[in-house]
Image (cartoon, rainbow, N blue to C red):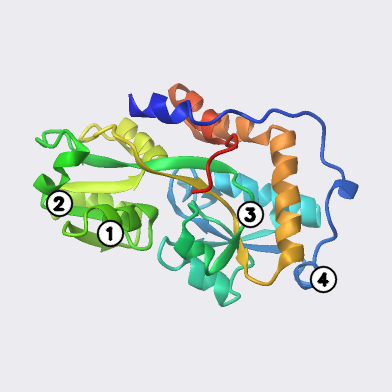
Amino acid sequence: MAIRALALCGLLLIGTGALHAQDLPSLPPAIAAKGELIVGVRCDQPPYGFKDRDGSFAGVEVEMAKQIATYAFGSPAKAAMVCVTAENRIPQLASGKVDLLIATLGKTPERARLIDYSVPYNFGGGDILVLKDSPLRRLADIKQAGTVAMLKGSTQAAWFDANQPGLDTLRLNSISDALQALKQKRAGAMAADLATLVVIAQRDPAVRRLDEAFGLTVGGLGVRKGEPEWLAYINAALTGIAKEDRYTGWIEKWVEQDKWPLYKSQFPPAALPDL
C-alpha cells in the first residue's frame, strides 16, 4: 500500500529531556516586543489545523504553535492564531500580518525563493479522493476524471502543473470547498495532502482514496526572508519539540488510533533528500 511505502521513508527522531531557556537563542526584539506569537495556521485541514465543534483551533500544527508560544512567552495562550489558506499563507507572512507559518507548508523551490524555511518537521505526499462508485482506479488514468478539484497554491496543484499540464482543474480555497465540488460532481476527483485524505476517507463512506501517493515533500515552518535570528529561534524550538517527543502525544490526541503509525513515521522526518 502507498501509506506503508510512505511510512518507510521516515523514522522517528527520539530524544529525552526537557528544553531549557538556555537551550534557545535569544528571542528577536521585534518578536519579543509584541508579547505574543502571531502565527498563521490552517483552519480546514484536519488533523493538522482546523476548527473544532466549539470553533476553537485544533490539530497537530496548532499544538506546535502553542508549544513555541510557551517557549517564547511562557504560555500556550500567547499563541495568537490566524486562519490562512494554501493560497494566501505566504502573502499573509510577507505583509507582516503573521510572523510565522505553521500551515502544511511543503517545501518547493518556488516558495523557497519567497520565504525562509525552518528545518523539516514532517514529510508527506499527495493522494486522490474519488466518489465510492467512481471507475477511476489509478493516478495514470486521472484524465478520465474530467475535472480535478485541488487547492490554490498547493503542492498538489504545482505537481499537476508540472506533470499533467493539460489536465482540467478546479482550484479552490479550502478542503471543504474541494470536497463539496467532488460530492456535487463538479469535479470527478480531488487532489490533496495524503494524510488529510486518510482522515476524510475514514470518516466519510461516500468517498475513497486511490491510495497512490505522489509528490513527496518535506514540510517546514515559514518565516520572512531577512530574519536569521527568528529562523534560528524557530529551528531551536523544533529541535526541542522533537527532543521532548511531543509529536507522539499530539498525534495520539488528534489522529484516529489505526492511523498512528503513518503519522508517527512522518513527525519528525529522518534525513531526506533535498526536495
Task: Point out the tag, 2 or 3, that comes first from the N-terminus.
Answer: 3
Q: Is residue 149 left or right of residue 34?
A: left
Residue underneath mark 1 = 161
Which image quarter: residue 122?
top right
One can see residue 150 in this view: no
Question: At 64% across and 67% down in the image, what residue appears?
Answer: 99
Dot 2: element: loop
Callout in the foreground (2, 1): 1
Between 28 and 75, the one nearer to me in the picture: 28
Residue underneath mark 4 = 29
Question: At 33% across and 37% down in the image, what residue appears?
Answer: 213
On residue 114, the disc is none
Q: Residues within 10 Å of mark 3 (few under 14, many from 20)?
A: many
Q: Is residue 135 left or right of residue 114?
A: left
Question: At 12% across and 47% down in the image, what residue appears?
Answer: 145
Q: Is residue 94 above or below residue 246?
A: below
Q: Residues within 10 Å of mark 4 (few under 14, many from 20)?
A: few
**Circles 4 and 2: CB distance less than 8 Å?**
no
Q: Amino acid at mark 3?
A: Ser
Compute the Cα span from label 2 to label 1: 24 Å
Dot 1: element: helix
Task: Point out the tag, 4 or 3, that comes first from the N-terminus.
Answer: 4
Q: Amino acid at mark 4?
A: Pro
* Residue 91 rendering spot, x and y as whole percentages: 49, 73
Q: Amino acid at mark 2?
A: Gln
